[in-house]
Amino acid sequence: MRFKQADYYCSTSNKAYALKGLNIYKSLYVQSLINNSQSVKKRALEGLIRCSKKLGLSTKEYEKELGIKSEKVQKRPSILKNSLYNIRLGKGYVDFFFRYPLKSSDIRSSTLKSRSVYKKIYDIAGRLAIRAKSYRLRSIKRMRIGQYNSKTIRIVLEDTHPIRSKLTIIGNKLRIYLVPLSSPSDKSTSKRTKSKQTKKPKVPTIVTNASKVIVIDPGHGGKDTGAIGYKRKREKDIVLLIAKRVYQELKKRGFKVYLTRRGDYFVTLRNRTRMANRVKANLFLSIHANAAPNKKKYFSMKGLETFFLSPARSVRAKRIAALENRVDMKNLSYYSKNVFLNFINREKTILSNKLAIDVHRSILAKLRQKYSVKDGGVRPGPFWVLVGAQMPSILVEVGYITNPTEAMRLSNPLYQKYIAQGIAEGVQNYFLHTQSR
Ligand SMILES: [Zn+2]
């Protein structure tokens, strides 16, 4: 029994043994997610906590997953103690200097309009260490700074036109750019500014596609051909062609894009997500093509399916995952601490689900302009390639290469282009929907 083994390793005073025990608990934990077994999950998490403590590693994520409250309370006062001690006016921007580094979650923004006065309000956690003051600026009519309540500093920008401002945080400096109305730059933000006025206060962030990094992962490659379908078409070849088109489409939209492989060679699952983590990707998209389990089903099984990482609930998701996981399933101990911890992140699962929905919907809508395509749905699934990704990640099965019609379509440049455009459109929609992230 592996639990006994892990318990034993963790109970020794040998560090190498304790690490070994930790890794066994990790793999048990992953197994529990795949089999959706609550009791195994609980035992594995308890073991992970015990073993991590012994090794002096953080147990926070495990405790969160187990439902134990962490000592967050202690940290809070230091955030409230932050203070604004200096303001410097620059050309087209204003710099605010704080005692401690700021986080975007310390800042809330909102927009107000009354008659012909437009106001942009920034509420920042902290105290004003200088006198409240009003400024006249070149780019906007007025800027006021004051203590809104005991915990909040308020900055109000005022003008007779809607105000377009952007923020950046550099350590303990907050810079607000005041974009003149006539500025032709950045068409993409104008839409968002409009919709923002009707919404509740939001954490402001600068959203431009150029600041978003996306990693496209063409499945399989090299010795791993993936599925082989109608007319001996190989999954690894088809998904590479599609991935390259996705790359182009996303580039066109201004995103920063990387491919995990650019040719027909083998890349381990671990290295695919490693790369995504290294380039600090915002999204990870793995592209695959599906295959029916046997000849009898070559005609009946078809359609588009999109997966996000989660314990499999359906037999179907389990089957497809088993197929895609085949290559380096055995190397569970690979997963480093960080990589593994991220797997337990519930927020990431929610975002991945959202991403899956946006992308899936957009591909279907695009393809259906010209083709009739079966909607295989968005599903949770235990895909190893997604395990290591520290960012929202999905796996798209673009169609069944064992189905003659779909195999031919998937090899058709126009069909590939439509899929690529659909994916890019979906990514764009995802960022619009989750703007504040
Ligand atoms: Zn595949």
Image (tube, helix red, strand yellow):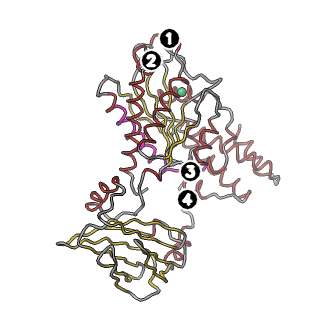
Q: Residue at x 29, y 28 (%)?
A: 369
**Labels 1 & 2 near each other (Cβ < 8 A):** yes
Label 3 Cα crowd, 10 Å radius (few <14 / some 14-19 / many 20+): some
Which three-letter amino acid code belongs to the residue tagged 4?
Answer: Ile
Which three-letter amino acid code belongs to the residue tagged 2?
Answer: Ala
**Label 4 beta carbon less than 8 Å to ligand 1:** no
Q: Which residue is mark 4?
A: 68
Which three-letter amino acid code belongs to the residue tagged 3?
Answer: Lys
Q: Which mark is residue 231?
A: 1
Q: Which residues are magenta?
A: 340-364
Q: Which residue is mark 2?
A: 407
**119 vs 75, nearest the viewer:** 119
The N terminus lies in which quarter of the figure? top right
What distance separates the C-alpha of mark 2 from that of mark 3?
Answer: 34 Å
Q: Which mark is residue 280?
A: 3
Q: Above or below — where is 254 with respect to 79?
A: above
Asked which quadrant contains residue 333, the reply is top right
What distance separates the C-alpha of mark 1 from that of mark 4?
Answer: 55 Å
